[in-house]
Image (tube, rainbow, N blue to C red):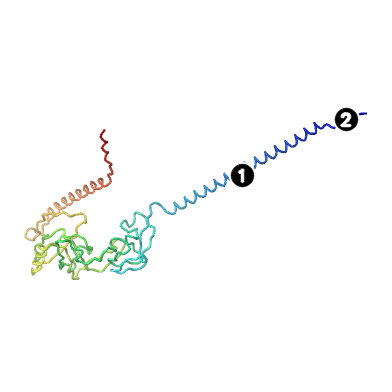
Amino acid sequence: MKKKSPPYALIGALLLGVVAVYLFYQNHQAAEKRIQDALAAAKQESDKELADARARSITVSSTPTDMRDVLYATQPVEPGARISPAFFEKKLTPRGILPDALTDPNDVIGMFAIRKIEKGDPITPRNVGKSLPYMSQRISPGMRALSLKVFNGGDINDTGGFIVDGDRVDLLYTVGGVNTQTVMQNVNVLYVPGPPIKTDKTDGITPIPAPGDSISVTFEVTPEQAQALIYMTGAKDGRFSMILRARKDDSEIKIKPFQSSDYNLADLKKVQKTVDKSIDRVKELAAEIDAKEKTEGSQANTNETTTPTPPSP
């Protein structure tokens, strides 16, 4: 009996099938691994971006946009000392506080302390300057400095004690206690003596001494004004007083002298009538100043760009 030959074709087909299945499985595994790797990489990138966003959020929230760096004294500074980097440091401060405080160290280094600066005080144009405040440097060309004894006796203090260098005042002159008149208006105060004080309202203010102390205030006047004032000091019963003006008020008005012969203090109706007229005038002046500030503010905020002229054809 003749032997049958083995089914090589069938065996080969089976082997090819097994190989094909194995290759398909390997390819499937490799593709799945690539997908898993891609998903893991995408998740890692997403996590990194989320972490960066959170870090940026924390940084922004820790430094609010309404804060700025302000220079503060790190130690007491005596008047006349030259400012160096060792005298100050930067601290974050709300923008709405200390609007005139200095923020750039380059603007401060080399300046002089023009008044005593305590540790922790902000550095401002009120306590530092480019030069020492010698009196001769503060006098405008053509003007003169005159020290005048101003009445501050008894229990009377005409200004409440709060006149500082750079304020403007009106000078009143009283003779014999029966006649008082305004002799000069809008006079610049160069120097007022007095001990420095510091509160949340009066940082750096140098008030005039208490009533009863002698006081000699230095004013900036013309040579002719100096002559008149010195002459008036020779009157036996004459004395000067000063009244403080608003910083924005440079108006000068005609004021009738107040004298006892014109007013009966037992009947104050005439005095009240004069006062009422003055109050109306003050209201008009306040309205004028307010309108002027609004006009200047609107002009400062205008940022118009002119239309360019087209080129000629």
Q: Residues within 10 Å of mark 2 (few under 14, many from 20)?
A: few
Q: Which residue is mark 2?
A: 4
- Mark closest to the chain's N terminus, 2 or 1: 2
Taking the view exactly as shown, the residue that stands out farthest to the top is 1
**Residue nearest the observer in this picture, 55 or 119:** 55
Estimate the x, y position of residue 109 in percent, counting from the top left. 33, 63
**Residue nearest the observer in this picture, 266 or 83:** 83
Could you tell me the amino acid type at mark 1? Answer: Asp
Q: Quadrant of the C terminus?
A: top left
Q: Is residue 172 above or below residue 212?
A: above
Estimate the x, y position of residue 129 in percent, counting from the top left. 27, 63
Q: Residue at x 72, y 38 (%)?
A: 22
Estimate the x, y position of residue 91 in percent, counting from the top left. 39, 60
Q: Quadrant of the N terminus?
A: top right
Q: Quadrant of residue 250?
A: bottom left
Q: Residues within 10 Å of mark 1 (few under 14, many from 20)?
A: few
**Residue nearest the observer in this picture, 189 or 25:** 25
Q: Secondary structure at mark 2?
A: loop
Q: Which residue is mark 1?
A: 37
